[in-house]
Amino acid sequence: MPIRILGIESSCDETAAAVVADGRTILSNVISSQVDVHRKYGGVVPELASREHLRKIVPVVREALDRAGMGLHDVDAFAVTSGPGLVGSLLVGLTYGKVLAASLGKPLLAINHLEGHVRAVFLEAYRNGNEPRLPGVCLIVSGGHTVLYELGSEGRHGQGTAAANLVYRKIGQTRDDAAGEAYDKVARLLGLGYPGGPVIDVLAAKANEVGDGSRGNVRFAHAKMRGNRYDFSFSGIKTAVLYYLRSHPELAPEIARRREAIEAGKRSAADLLPLTTPATLELLASFQRTVVDELVGRTLDAADESAVRCVLVSGGVAANAELRVTFEREVERRGFEVFFPSRALSTDNAAMIAAAGYAKLVAGELANGTLNAEPVLQLA
Ligand code: KG4
Ligand code: ZN
């Protein structure tokens, strides 16, 4: 009989629950996004986030069980995100999981959200029958995090990586904004709504079709890093976009038109494209090129230096098409292999939390009733 773990994720603005068998097979994966609640504020409002989690947590868990064809009594263990994240949000999922585990007498597993993102890469790899062979280098790139690790595994290899402990050594991180945060801030400056990543992903690609084909003719300087050369910085590019807009007041009317469209509910990339001039598409392509080059360049340099052949990329920004294509092209050139989750598993979800729970359960690392939310929890 497979071990079925119910995962619960509520660290930011998605209320999610999922059932995963033996840390490998997704039986259900339910995500309720709060994007519509936070959109008009241009970012996540913590108080509203916890209130929404409270409204959604029970129906989302019920739906995850229904879709897996299970009842609560069939769950072998409960895995909850304990951090990092917004404390009020974390507490909702964590407390609900704690109560379920205690009342059913089942194990409770505390999961680091970042380890969840790493396990998402493996979930996808199991599905494709091509698993990353560790050690490797792992980039987690989302709205809250941009971190680079050396990743290894230990113990229980007979049962595959799903049951093995992952071991991390942090080798770089952002010194200011996360990459996803830069996407969201630039989207806000340009009247492209929230979250910014998915829309900029599509519009930047259009620069090729309607622009002069140069893929972004605005040149942004790359951040110069003193000290650790695997650290990242994204606040400079955001400020550069701001200055560009100040010196190009002719772009102001189209920004206002897009804001109006978004207010009226027309917020998809297809809605916004006709309201966006080639000059702005070029600006977006330039911004994205700079961010992608920074992420891919530093990650692959780190892989080169540590002589590993395997690169893992996860987190919301890993859904970005240009990031994927650039990684694929560059790893081929250098003789590495790169692994991503599917786009759906790149952004926050609970399947990755349930998958991470399996290794903890096998290792006997159980949490108890004293488990609390840890908003600044680190992996290494
Ligand atoms: O992992 P995630 O769902 O939540 C956090 O843990 O932060 O990541 C959300 C972030 C947002 O900043 C969003 O703009 C960005 O990921 N994002 C993208 C794309 N899809 C989501 N950024 C670039 N391209 C995308 N396709
Ligand atoms: Zn995340």
Image (cartoon, rainbow, N blue to C red):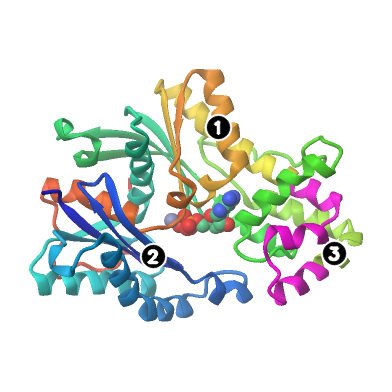
Give the number of the mark in front: 3 or 2.
3
Ligand 2 is found in the corner quadrant, namely: bottom left
| Mark 1 Cα-neighbour bin, 10 Å: few <14, some 14–19, many ≥20 | many
Q: Which residues are magenta?
A: 256-284
Q: Which residue appears at 41% of the width and 68% of the height?
A: 86
Q: Is label 3 in contact with label 2 (beta carbons under 8 Å)?
A: no
Secondary element at image label 2:
loop
Measured from the top left, where is residue 22 in percent x and y?
20, 46
- Residue under circle 3? 254
Circle nearer the N terminus (3, 2): 2
User: Is the residue indicated by label 1 positioned so its CB lies within 8 Å of ligand 1?
Assistant: no
User: Is the residue indicated by label 3 positioned so its CB lies within 8 Å of ligand 1?
Assistant: no
User: Is the residue indicated by label 2 positioned so its CB lies within 8 Å of ligand 2?
Assistant: yes
- Residue under circle 2? 11
- Residue under circle 1? 327
Circle nearer the N terminus (2, 1): 2
Q: Is label 1 in contact with label 3 (beta carbons under 8 Å)?
A: no
Q: Is residue 370 visible?
A: no
Q: Residue furthest right?
A: 250
Q: CA distance from mark 2 to mark 1?
A: 28 Å
